[in-house]
Image (cartoon, rainbow, N blue to C red):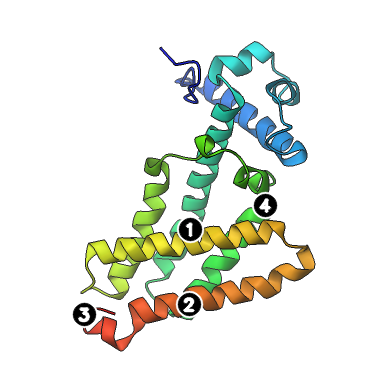
């Protein structure tokens, strides 16, 4: 039984019809949150946008935080899927090219997901669980191990965490900036991430397996 403040889905769809309904509700939530912001968005507005009875929305999600958490989780999975081909290609890409493409891909993702800026301001309770974020983290860690086989798995994971935090910081700033100023700051973040990874992964000291 769910506690009153639970953000877990009330019902997990197990049939195609239920999955389709949840997808429609999440699409409606994305639209409403993008237009109104997290605080002003309401369950009633989401149900109305989805052309669904309010009871149908509550059947799957007990509150706005729950549907927002599900939307965040969907974004995380989509971003992980978007990054997957790039990470595979990065086996042969130069580090500078990899960083540039990763950041360009990230900002393009933000631009194409209208609720993304509003979700950055949503409460901590709506954040995706570590289990949802782990696949992308492991992909980055694996990439660093490919580029530097003598690196420990612990160090590779640390570099992956810092890389994701740099991307997160960029996302926060990017969504707040006027569009005409974004490109300049994107270039600065490319320098930041490249400099960090070049020092920790590509340096001669790192290549010898030394602590840097």
| Residue 115 in the image: above or below residue 166 | above
Query: Mark 3 against mark 1, which lies toward the viewer?
Result: 3
Query: Mark 3 against mark 4, which lies toward the viewer?
Result: 3
Give the labeled residue for mark 1: 83
Between marks 3 and 4, how big is the CA–CA gap? 40 Å
Give the mark nearest the N terminus, 1 or 4. 1
Between marks 1 and 4, how big is the CA–CA gap? 15 Å
Crowdedness of circle 3 by 10 Å Cα count: few (<14), some, many (20+)?
some
The residue located at (21%, 80%) in the rendering is 209
Give the mark nearest the N terminus, 2 or 1. 1
Q: Give yes or no for contact between labels 3 and 1 (Cβ–Cβ under 8 Å).
A: no
Between marks 3 and 1, how big is the CA–CA gap? 28 Å
Give the mark nearest the N terminus, 4 or 2. 4
Give the mark nearest the N terminus, 3 or 1. 1
Between marks 4 and 2, how big is the CA–CA gap? 25 Å
Q: In this orientation, does residue 7 appear?
A: yes
Give the labeled residue for mark 2: 194
Give the labeled residue for mark 3: 209
Query: Mark 4 against mark 2, which lies toward the viewer?
Result: 2
Q: Nearer the viewer, residue 129 or 105?
A: 129
Crowdedness of circle 1 by 10 Å Cα count: few (<14), some, many (20+)?
some
The residue located at (33%, 69%) in the rendering is 144
Between marks 2 and 1, how big is the CA–CA gap? 17 Å
Q: Quadrant of residue 22?
A: top right
Q: Position of residue 110 (x, y in %)?
A: 63, 54
Describe the element under mark 4 as helix, strand or loop.
helix
Q: Give yes or no for contact between labels 2 and 3 (Cβ–Cβ under 8 Å).
A: no
The residue located at (29%, 70%) in the rendering is 146
Give the labeled residue for mark 4: 112
């Amino acid at each position: 039984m769910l506690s009153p403040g639970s953000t877990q889905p009330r019902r997990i769809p197990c049939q195609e019809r239920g999955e389709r309904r949840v997808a429609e509700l999440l699409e409606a939530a994305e639209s409403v949150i993008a237009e109104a912001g997290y605080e002003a968005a309401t369950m009633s507005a989401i149900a109305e946008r989805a052309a669904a009875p309010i009871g149908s929305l509550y059947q799957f999600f007990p509150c706005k935080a729950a549907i927002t958490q599900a939307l965040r989780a969907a974004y995380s999975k989509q971003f992980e899927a978007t990054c997957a081909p790039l990470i595979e290609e990065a086996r042969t890409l130069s580090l500078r090219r990899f960083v540039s493409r990763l950041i360009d891909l990230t900002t393009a993702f933000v631009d194409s997901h209208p609720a993304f800026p509003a979700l950055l301001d949503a409460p901590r309770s709506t954040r995706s669980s570590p289990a949802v974020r782990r696949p992308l983290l492991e992909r980055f860690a694996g990439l660093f191990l490919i580029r530097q086989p003598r690196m420990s798995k612990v160090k590779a994971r640390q570099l992956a965490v810092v890389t994701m935090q740099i991307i997160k910081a960029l996302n926060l700033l990017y969504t707040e900036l006027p569009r005409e100023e974004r490109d300049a700051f994107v270039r600065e973040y490319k320098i930041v991430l490249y400099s960090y990874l070049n020092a920790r992964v590509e340096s001669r000291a790192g290549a010898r397996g030394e602590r840097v």
